[in-house]
Amino acid sequence: MPTASCPLRRSADSPGSVAIGWLNAESLRNKTDDVNLAITERSLDVLALTKTWHTASDDNCLRLATPSDYAVTRPSHRGGGIAVIFRKRWKCATLKTPTCSTFEVFAVRLTTDSGPFVVVIVYRPGSDHLRTQFFDELSTLLETLVVYACPVLVGANFNIKTQSSNDPSARRLADLLTSFDMVQHVQGPTHRSGNTLDVVVTPANCALDSVDVEPFGMLSDHSLIVSRLPFVVDAASMVEKLVRRWRRVDRNELRQALEDSELCRPPPPSSDDADVDQLFATYDTVLRRIADRLVPQHSIHRLACRLSLWFDALSHSTTTMSPFGAQVPEDGHLY
């Protein structure tokens, strides 16, 4: 099973991180108070639960297990398997997932002050025979996750002995995750049997601050796993932008200015020898001169927008190129 390339820290809570807990509850009926306390004592931001055995979204056990400043969501279909408890101040959207018959799956996008992230919960009953169809359906699910431009965390109780390199199912699962460039972060046993049955999987470029596996037997036969996703809240800052009031442009005046410019005159004979760069320089100079006369630039101050996590320097350099290959001005406006 592939593991994270960076070392996992077992230190105290990391500032600026989101704490996400994963637990196979083996029924909430007799442990609502314990789960509620686990959330508050560990300052969990999210707790993803499987095998809760609740019967409806308004099930009393879900309500009792959810602290007052948290909310809970679950799949809309009938059943009692999966639920997600999260901070009430966050926005939560249920995501569409493929129809799967070999495992339960539920996915949500949670939006924090620092941006969104996706939580996917998968549960495969250990009593079911492990078939090829399971891996086919899991592959289809992973294919749907690559489109998200934010951190994606998959917490799964596959009921596969992922620590065993001699287990054919474990090897096949490892190969599947590798083919999607995904990393399994959990190390050590997560079940009373001594096996690693519960995993936390992310894309290789989605680093986690830490993954802590608590002793099994405290809440159920499975360990409570706490992963920490680094999120830094940027302080709001004002930036100055140069803009033009394009909506105020008189179209007739603009048309006349273009017709009177050298762009609409027959080119002089000497222009036959002009190269492409010179022609575009003339085009740019004339349009800027007209824009400066009709809609002069003025400065405004506004809050700086936070870039998406996937928007790196390469993305910036690519999107600030004009269709002709020339760099767009720093104010972000084409002239």
Image (cartoon, rainbow, N blue to C red):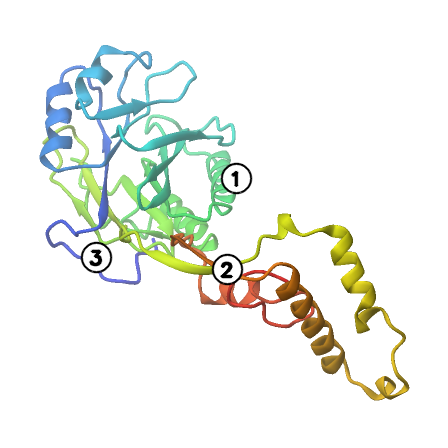
Distance CA(mark 1)–CA(mark 3)? 29 Å
273 displayed left or right of 89 = right
- The answer, for residue 240, to whether it is visible in the render is yes
Is residue 283 or residue 13 the one in the foreground? 283
Q: Residues within 10 Å of mark 1 (few under 14, many from 20)?
A: some
Cα gap from disc 3 to disc 2, whole angstroms: 50 Å
- Point out residue 116 in the picture as x, y percentages from the top left corner: 37, 42
- Residue ID for mark 3: 8
Dot 3 falls on a residue whose secondary structure is loop
3 and 2 marks in contact (CB < 8 Å): no
Q: Amino acid at mark 3?
A: Leu
Q: Which mark is residue 298?
A: 2
Residue type (three-letter) at the residue carrying disc 2: His
| Label 1 or label 3, whichever comes before in sequence order | 3
The residue that disc 1 covers is 140
The numbered mark, 3 or 2, whose residue comes first in the sequence reads: 3
The front one of 326 and 295 is 295
Along the line of sight, the residue nearer the viewer: 95 or 10: 95
Q: Earlier in the sequence, mark 2 or mark 1?
A: 1
Tell me the quarter of the picture where residue 261 sits: bottom right
